[in-house]
Structure formats: C-alpha cells, structure tokens
Image: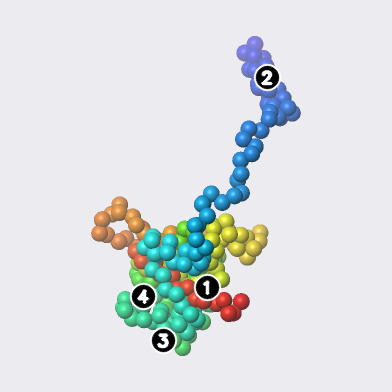
Amino acid sequence: MAIEQNTTAKEKILKKVRQALISKSKVLYSNIDLDSNVYSLPLTHEPILETFAKNFTLINGQFIYCDNHFDFLDKFITLTERKKYKSLYCWEESIQEKFKDSGIQFIPNKKNLITAQVGVTSCEAIVARTGSILLSSSRNGRSLSFVPHTHIVVAYTSQVVMEIKDAMQIVKNRYGRNMPSMLSIVSGPSCSTSIENIKINGGQGPNELFLFLIDNKTEI
C-alpha cells in the first residue's frame, strides 16, 4: 500500500509539472531591458583613449603611450633599465619579433618561471569604461600574467573599446566556435592585503601592471 501511495504522489507531481508546461503562466517583468548599457553616458565627449588612460591609472595601472613600434622599443628599454629587470619572460612570437636586434634579453620558455621578475604578454582587448585588460589562455595561459612580480602588456590603439561586451565581441569574432578555455579581465595590479609586506610568487598576482599602448591607427 505504501508503494501505491508513493507512486500516486509521484504521478500527481508529474501531472502538475506537465500542466505547468502546457499552460504557461504570463511572463512577469517581460519589459525588462537586458541590452541597454547600465552605465550612464559621459557628460562630455571624452576621447576613448583618454577615458581608458584615466580609468586605468585610477586603479594603479601604469600607462605608457607609444607613437609607433620604434617609440615602444625606446620606452620599453628605458623602463627595463630604470627598473633593472633581470628575469624577463616573453613567450609570444609576435612580441619576440619586436625585441629582435634591440638588445632586449628575454626567456622564451617556462623554465624557472617561479623566479620570473617580469612577464610580457599581449591581450585580446582593452576596456576603456573600467580601465581593464581582457586576456585569454590562447596567447599565454594564465601563469605568465600572474606569477611574475610585474606584468607588462603590449597592446594597440585598435584594441581599445568602450564596454566589456564590445571586448567579448572581439573575442567571438576572432575565435568563433573555438573559444579560448579561459578569459580573464585584469583591473590593475594585485591589491591583496591578506599577507602584509610579503610577496609570494604565484600567490597574489603581480605587484605592478604596465600597459604599452602602440598607436597603429595609420596601419589599419
């Protein structure tokens, strides 16, 4: 008898579910706008690069504008000499090509990455609204932007968009169905205070974040 009662109760529940699926109730809040921008529009027509530079520096990012590739190399060498970087890791061929014949020394593999001072990467896009950088695993994985004390990003003015959704659209257009296994948005260097005055490699993210933004508007 207990089995029959349980079966009956189960049938009653399934019957209610079927009825609910057949006769759907009126959708509540059907007029909600899920597409419009949640941010208020700026009061002035500020250039997008200025918007990014302002928001990026507000979150302690260090922004370096470069007129062209030669200007980039000059400023990059100046930074590395001033900071006296000794262990600089760079895995991307496109960036390595820029370093050729410049005297910039780099490590092209993962050997002893835990001791790295600097990781140099590119990015997928730059978000002006939040001053953020969109990275993906298809270029360097996660470790090169997270383990070293300093993360240096090399990007182009053509990669700067206003909103995160615009950055995601760039990724979708680039990869189609073969999306990277990981996407991450970097908003400034590590600000963790869980361990005071101690930097553990791979534990908190980089202490410094530099962005070299190369003007390529005449090349596109």
Q: Amino acid at mark 2?
A: Lys
Earlier-in-chain disc, 1 versus 2: 2
- How many residues crowd mark 2 within 10 Å: few (<14), some (14–19), many (20+)? few
Q: Which residue is labeled 1 in the image? A: 156
Name the side, left or right, on which 198 lies relative to 171.
left
Q: Secondary structure at mark 1?
A: strand
> What distance separates the C-alpha of mark 1 from that of mark 2?
62 Å
Q: Is residue 191 above or below residue 113?
A: above
Earlier-in-chain disc, 3 versus 1: 3
Q: Residue at x 43, y 61 (%)?
A: 55
Q: Position of residue 134 (x, y in %)?
A: 51, 62
Q: Position of residue 91 (x, y in %)?
A: 48, 73
Q: Position of residue 220 (x, y in %)?
A: 61, 76
Q: Amino acid at mark 3?
A: Gly
> What distance separates the C-alpha of mark 3 from that of mark 2?
77 Å
Q: Nearer the viewer, mark 4 or mark 1?
A: 1
Q: Which mark is residue 87?
A: 4
Q: Which residue is labeled 2 in the image? A: 12
Discs 3, 2 touching: Cβ within 8 Å = no
Q: Which residue is labeled 3 in the image? A: 103
Residue at the far top: name it: 1
Q: Nearer the viewer, residue 54 or 146?
A: 54
Q: Position of residue 212 (x, y in %)?
A: 45, 73
Q: Amino acid at mark 1?
A: Tyr
Discs 1, 2 touching: Cβ within 8 Å = no
Earlier-in-chain disc, 4 versus 3: 4
Earlier-in-chain disc, 4 versus 1: 4
Q: Amino acid at mark 4?
A: Ser
> What distance separates the C-alpha of mark 3 from that of mark 1?
22 Å
Discs 4, 1 touching: Cβ within 8 Å = no
